[in-house]
Image: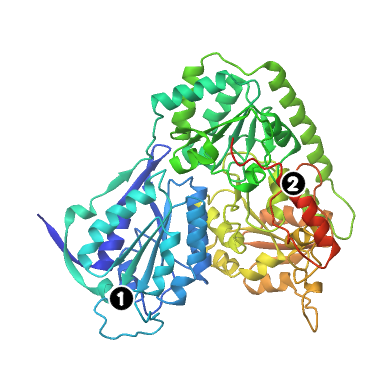
Amino acid sequence: MQTVRLTMAQALVRFLAAQQTVIDGHKVPLFGGVWAIFGHGNVAGMGEALYQVRDRLPTFRSHNEQSMAHAAVAFAKASFRRRMMAVTTSIGPGATNVVTAAAVAHVNRLPLLILPGDVFADRRPDPVLQQIEDFGDGTVSANDCFRPVSRYFDRLTRPEQLVPALERAMQVLTDPADCGPVTLALCQDTQAEACDYPEAFFAERVWAPRRIRPALDELQAAVGALRGAAKPLIVAGGGVLYSGAARTLAAFAESHGIPVAETQAGKSTLPHDHPLNMGSIGVTGASAANALAEEADLVLAVGTRLQDFTTGSWALFKNPASRLVGLNVQVFDATKHRAMPLVADAEAGLADLAADLGGWRAPSTWTDRAKGLADDWRKAVDDAILATNAEKPSDGQVIGAVQRVVGSAATIVCAAGGLPGELHKLWRAGAPGSYHLEYGYSCMGYEIAGGLGVKMAKPDEEVVVMLGDGSYLMANSEIATSVMLGLKLTVVVLDNRGFGCINRLQMATGGANFNNLLEHARHETLPEIDFAAHAASLGATARKVASLADLEAALAQARAEPRTTVLVIDTDPLATTKAGGHWWDVAVPEVSPRREVTDARAAYETARQRQRLLN
């Protein structure tokens, strides 16, 4: 057996550089690169190793560990999980900064390879700088924080352990059912320790997506349920996009006359103007989708984990006779809420369903009614996004301004606050993947870094990031990274002076205006934050606009700008789109001296009676 002597870190990056995938008939590297912020836990071992392969496996420098991991997660999401990135950090705060992003990847079933430095395996210099010491367990380090947010976790204390660890890591990262973050904690001394590795370990390997086909009995049961349905509805989740099944789903819906509603992760599965696209579903849903969901006697949930925003906290599906079929590659998701499981890849499952259904179609009265509701909803969207001369427009009106300029071809990026709900309802998505929302973990601070990751995955496409002032203040440093890397973003900051979304939720649950908007927080002086000046200091072209018309003009100019542009507009913290939507289970205190809370509790108890614990 031929061997080559390398340090563990050198072997690790050489292996990563050899992994390939095939997209649209072209072989490309599976790993788009490695994000790195070096410190004493990784600069000597991983730093030297990455330098040696910098032409085959590029290294990117960020300004914040959490943000660089968000960029890596967004890259994988924008690549429909066909490509991915790795991140490496020092031990201590560098590592724990990544835990939040690991949770984002875990919740959203996205691949992320995390390579944090760790303590010394031989323990000679213990305790080293930034080492977490457990008084009762000598094996614990800060990296144990990654265990609950990793699909696979390993700590490498010997260089030989790299071989089985990477084999297991790759299986998890590329498996459609188990996909999620992998953490390989790299002890500092082990990174630098040499070993004779088999040359075959570094041979090029091409990873193709695994397409699981449904079991015959599950397929027959699902076909029978569909054939017996008079009011079927498809709920399309992110798994449809990751499977590359958007066209297959469209053909399936058209052939069988079944309307389609989209989750946050599944939005853009169908173009917004497709006659069977009922729009968003659930708490942030369109009136068309939600009206049909309430009546549906069969819900085919494709590639969705059915979180509470999708199901209206399980109060949306009101038909007592309704049945749920879970078409999902992961059995954990396929069987939720006593669903009839159809464990399969979305593409394969839909194709097999279509073949067995043959010429069956839903009743035309149901299909025609759905198309009429969709037309009504599109008119409601037109009204919500109309331009206004108001001093402080609503989020929906700002969305309209952005849409009128950039159209449906651009990829829109967002994550948290009030904007995801408004975008879910109002954004007119075009091609699959053009709507990029991180709403599984709803992580404030994802937006700008996520936009950077999307741009890395789609360098020739326009990427527009929309976020509030709260998220901007949490994480904005990757504006500088985008300028440094020459990756142009258009960033629209909606300044409502605080956490407007949660302030509205606080009011809706009977709470007093408290600690959300800046004016309601403890202060001596209210800050006058100049977001445009701040963004300009990071190297962006930036300006504050005075109106929607001014915003549209600035957006048009930004499209010709060669570098990242940040545009800031003041918005109304209270105005939201009233059309559509659904109740969401947010527990209200049973006891309070305030009448507003007791009234909200009474309404809450009434609403909870509509929840269905079992089908």
Label located before the other in sequence (1 or 2): 1
Nearer the observer, 427 or 350: 350
Q: Is residue 456 visible?
A: no
Q: Is residue 138 above or below residue 171?
A: below
Quadrant location of the C terminus in the rendered image: top right
Q: Is label 1 in a helix, a strand or a loop? A: helix
Q: Is residue 304 visible?
A: yes
Nearer the observer, 221 or 243: 221
**Rendered image quadrant of residue 595:** bottom right
In the displayed structure, does residue 272 sit left or right of residue 107?
right
Amino acid bearing label 2:
Ala
Label 2 crowd bin: few (<14), some (14–19), many (20+), radius 10 Å? some
From this viewpoint, which residue is outermost toward the top? 359
Q: Residue at image x 40%, y 47%?
A: 178
Nearer the observer, 442 or 415: 442
Callout count: 2
Q: Residue at image x 45%, y 74%?
A: 94
Q: For the residues carrying marks 1 and 2, which lies nearer the camera in this image? A: 2
**Circle on res. 188:** 1
- Reading the image, the residue beneath label 2 is 607
Q: Is label 2 in a helix, a strand or a loop? A: helix
Label 1 crowd bin: few (<14), some (14–19), many (20+), radius 10 Å? many
Residue 509 location, x and y as percent? Answer: 77, 58
